[in-house]
Amino acid sequence: MLKIAISSNISLGNDNDEINRNIDTIKAKELAQAKLAELRWKQEELKNSNQTLASTAEHQSAPTEVILDKNDVIEEGLNTPELKKRGGSKSKKKKMRCLFWNVRGLGNKARRRQLKVVIKERDVDLLCVQETKKESFTNKELNSFQGDKSFSRSWKAARGASGGILIGINSELMEVLENHVGAFFLSCLVKTKCDNFCWEFIGVYGPVNDSLKPVFLDDLRWHIQFRQHPYIIGGDLNMYRFASEKSNTNLDTRAMGLFNSFISYFDLRDLYRSGPRFTWTNKQDTPT
C-alpha cells in the first residue's frame, strides 16, 4: 500500500489516483491563496504608491549578494538576437546589487534595523528576503528598513509561522510591470528605466520536506517555461546541486538529480555571488 504524508502528517492517499486528486486539490488551494495575496498587495499598493521597502536578518544566516549588470543577464545564457541589439551606452549603465537573504523572521525591530544597515552599506537595488514568517506588513514596518532609497515592494504571505517572501525593487532605476505569486515563489517583471529593458526577478523559498521538492520544481517550471523575458531566480531553494555544497555527507541524491535536471532543461547558469561558502548553520559541533 502506497502512502505518502507531508510534514503536517496528513495522508495524501492510499493509491496513485487518490494521491493525484489530492495533490491537485492542494495546488488549487495554493493558487487561490496566491491570488488573494496578490490582490491584497495590489490594494495596499494603490493606497500607498509613494511608500517604500524593507526587511531584516538573523545572525545564523548570511546574505547572498549578486552584482548585476544588464549585460550579465544577457551573457549568462539568457541571450537572444533581440536582446543583443539592446546594448546601450556603457556610460549610462549602473551595476545593480541583488541581495538574497533568509532572514528567519521579521517580527522585531532589531532585525529590521539590521537589514536597513545591510541595504545601505551594500547599496542594494534588488532585495529578496525569505522566511519572513509574516502574513502582511504595515507601512511603518516597511518604511523602517527602506533606508534612503525608494523601493517598490511586494510579498507572499507566510503560512502560520513558516515561509513568506518579500521583494523590493529600487523604483528610481526600475519600474515593476507585474507580479506573480506561486506556491513557492514570488516574481516581479521589471523594466529598467534607462533603456526600457524588461526582465523578471524571481524569489523562491523551497520546501524543507523532501517529498515536496518535486512539487516545488514543478511549480517553478510551470511559471517560467512560457515566459518571454530573461529572468533571474534566487532565494532559499533548500536544495543543492553537488556534494561540495553540503557541509556534511548526508546527501539526497534523488533531489540533487531533479535539481540538476531542472537547471539543465532551462539552461540556467550560476551568477557569481559574494559571501561565505555556506549560507546557514545550526551552530552545532557537527553543523548542517
Image (cartoon, rainbow, N blue to C red):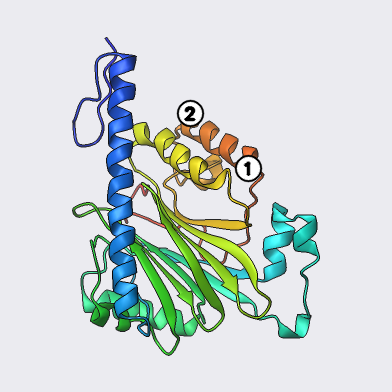
Callout 1, which amino acid?
Phe
Q: Which residue in the structure is indicated by mark 1?
A: 266
Where on the picture, by quarter, is residue 280?
Answer: bottom left
Which residue reaches farthest top?
Answer: 1
Which residue sits at x=58%, y=50%?
227
Residue 246 place in picture, x, y as percent: 48, 45
Which residue sits at x=67%, y=71%?
69
Q: Which residue in the structure is indicated by mark 2?
A: 254
Q: Foreground residue, 240 or 11?
A: 11
User: The N terminus lies in which quarter of the figure?
Assistant: top left
Where on the picture, by quarter, is residue 29?
Answer: top left
Q: Can residue 271 be seen here?
A: yes
As displayed, is residue 89 above or below residue 167? below
* Residue at mark 1 to residue at mark 2: CA–CA distance: 19 Å
Circle nearer the N terminus (1, 2) = 2
Callout 2, which amino acid?
Arg
Given this view, does label 1 or label 2 mark the residue nearer the observer?
1
